[in-house]
Amino acid sequence: MRKFLLLILKFCVFLRETLADPELLNVQVIFRHGARTPTVRFKAAIVPREYEKKPIGALTTRGLRQQYETGLKLKSRYIDKYRLVSKSFNQYETLVLSAMDDRCLQSAVANMAGFFSNPELGEDWPFNWMPVPIHTGTYPDRIFEPGQGCPRYTQTKDERTQLPAFKEFEEQYQEIITDFVANTGEKWRSLFELNPFVDAMVCAKEHNLTFPDWLTLERLTEARWALNKNFDYRWGHELNGERNELVVALRAGPMLKALISNFTQNSTHKYTAYSAHDSTLLAVLTALGKRTQYDILENDWPDYAATMVFELWKMDDGQLRVKFLYSYNSVDPKFHDFTNTIDGCPDEGMCPVKNIIMSLKKFIPKNMDMACAVKDQKGMLKKTLHEPRRVPHIQVFE
């Protein structure tokens, strides 16, 4: 009888281990910085006066709030619900990396203020604030700035934008360019040159500022749609929706390599956050799958504080799988599951790590410096220029 009970006990232990719940091993988060001011100062008074004499490209108080709220949303999922990391910052659990731009560094700080908003540091410490180290890099920052310091990408992009098919595409929108030039007095000749002004108007819309009298929301939307298609082409999509593998690799390769390095149960950190740009998110979305970007955004652009999440799970059979989630902005209450849009992943459920690696490895150059090199007139490879690191000057636009 005793032996029989012992066998039953062993069988129950075996059954429990076999049918164990999936375990969340680590999470990687990539978010766009919060709302900002325009990145270009215009000579003519064609943008809202609130932007006059304000620092360009600076995170606004609205942008800070967006990131704080995003941090709270991530905290709810990964600290409160899944208990992946401790309530207070632990350097062995959490790593925060940021692009070098001030707005990204500040966004990382604000995001972490929300994520670790319940520290136990004593009554004398500022309420609900935990200082978290933010790690940044040096030029070229290819992980956060797709194509930066990559002459071959610049060369390839320039060659592609001179092709007759692209010229024909741009000619479809000449009327938009003519209209904007007539109403502003500027001398824009292409959609690409029009982009800084359209971006300034998008910033104005985000902050509920007044448009110029001649500019309607419908006209702005039309111009932005055309520009989005323009940038899609410059950043790796063909006009027919296919992808240019070389362009995608030169832009997304470094970030993909960083992400894949953590698709292991022995990853150094449980939670890694990347404070980035819209271009960073788009580079990854383009690489993930032929339809990933369009299924998530259609022809739109990542909003301020838009967030991509890669969750690594260990299944009850020991297999490692990934869940890919997307949150559209700070007020979006959900993390939407788009795992099935990744090339090589099943239509339902999580995706085996091996499938993702097989799908993405073609976009990860073995040697990025060599991949980015171009030949001079003598056929010699030019070396990539390395510029000194920029020193941040923190500013916030009220």
Image (cartoon, grey):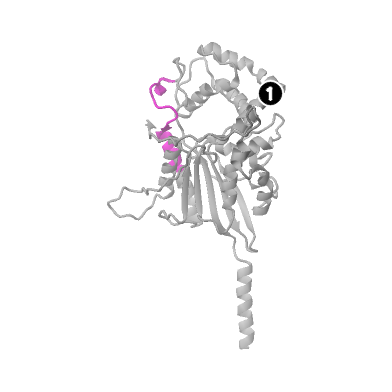
What residue is drawn where x is 60% and y is 41%? 368
Name the outermost residue toward the front.
378
Q: Nearer the viewer, residue 358 or 302?
A: 358
User: For the point 46% across and 36% down, which residue is it?
Assistant: 34
Q: Which residue is mark 1?
A: 166
Instruction: Tell me if 309 is positioned left or right of 242 in this view.
Output: left
Q: Position of residue 154 (x, y in %)?
A: 60, 30
377, 40: nearer the viewer: 377
- Percent position of residue 108, x then y: 44, 42
Disc 1 packing (10 Å; few <14; some 14–19; many ≥20)? some
Q: Is residue 112 visible?
A: yes
Coordinates of residue 319 in the picture (x, y in percent): 64, 60
Question: In this picture, is 309 found above or below 47?
Answer: below
In this view, which residue lies farthest toward the bottom?
1
Q: Is residue 229 visible?
A: no
- Image quarter of the C terminus: top left
| 60 drawn magenta | yes
Circle count: 1
Q: Quadrant of the N terminus?
A: bottom right
- Is the residue 363 above or below the residue 223 in the image? below
SS class of the residue under badge 1? helix
Label 1 sits on what residue type? Phe
Q: Residue at x 33, y 48 (%)?
A: 127
Span of residues in magenta: 48-69
| Residue at the image position 69 percent from the left and 39 percent from the top | 290
Residue 297 drawn in magenta: no
Quarter residue 379 falls in: top right
